[in-house]
Amino acid sequence: MASLENFRLVVFRAVAEQLSFRKAAEELYLTQPAVSLQIKALEEDVGVQLFDRTGAHITLTPAGKALLDYCEKVKTLLVQTEQEIAALTGEHTGQLALGASTTIAQYVLPRLLGEFRREHPRVHSTLISGNTEHIVEAVEKQRIALGFIEGPARSREVKTEPFLEDELVLIASTAHELAERNSVSCSEIASIPLLMRERGSGTRHVIEMALEHQGVKRSSLQIVMELDSTEAIKSAVEAGLGIGFVSRWAIAKDLRIGNNFKIVDIEGLRIKREFLVVYASGPEPQGLAFEFRRFIIARAGLQRTSFKVRQPEPAGVHKIRK
């Protein structure tokens, strides 16, 4: 289905977002004169100037700012319209904007997105990644329809729903002294150089909560390096820079092929968590967002009802709940 949005408004949004006729032309695969012509025609249609071109850089006029606000609302409504019309024919189509925290984006979503695309080949998905804090912010500002996060959202502007269970495990290089032992105590962790994800990471928040629950204060941890991805932690562990926590999903392939690190059990502690779908508060997601949320929860094998009745956890399991 072709886009229902007026082409001049598409051009206007591109210029307004880039604040550059040249960049907007590159984004839309148009010439710069063609972009200028569309903006001039739109200004003649509405009878006001939309951009101030007097300075070194263009800026939106008050009328331009008002139009941009309504353009965003119109775009959202038209996308929903396209998706609902497509759903009536039994074939989903359109744009689906997603975001995921780093571990999920790298190790969980690619396969699920591939399966979804095979079922719905006319859906075009975009995926941004970042830490949990950044993904929640993107949902709040409606830059993405759905987010997938590793830790608590800590925002009243969004809703969350579990879709997959994960466990955080401690890994050490095979050359590390801990690799020769079967387990380590929580108190020992506080005295060993530790590699940790950056502040704002859902993984870091979950780890700190679990250790504090065992009496290990975050202030006592010897964090020698903060890294912004699981892959960076794995590489640093292999290089012998310290020990670190990673998701089991992130090391499943590595353990099969025998990489240079091993899991070190923690006495009396297992850190389990739930990966969460996050979406804006208010009406339930519709169209493609609803379809993908339904799809991913079904594929993960976790329906909402399965989280209402839980079996008792074995002793020593620390489970992070939303």
Image: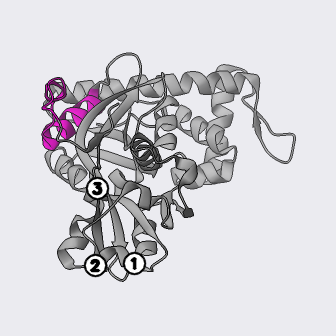
Residue indicated by mark 2: 259
Q: Is residue 43 above or below residue 273?
A: above
Report, in whole angstroms, how far the alpha carbon at label 3 lies from the one at label 2. 24 Å
Q: Is residue 162 above or below residue 118?
A: above
The residue at the far bottom in this view is 175
Query: Circle 1 — which element?
Result: helix
Residue 238, disc:
1
Amino acid under label 2? Answer: Asn
Quadrant for the C terminus in the image: top left
The answer to whether 180 is drawn above or below residue 279 in the figure is: below
| x and y percentages locating residue 191 in the rendered image | 50, 63
Residue 280 percent coordinates (x, y)? 42, 25
Q: Amino acid at mark 1?
A: Glu
- Side (left or right) of 252 relative to 173: left
Nearer to us in this view, 121 or 112 = 112
Disc 3 residue crowd, few under 14, some 14–19, many 20+, Cα 10 Å: few
- Which region shows up in magenta? 287-312
Name the residue tied to disc 3.
267
State which quadrant residue 65 falls in. Answer: top right
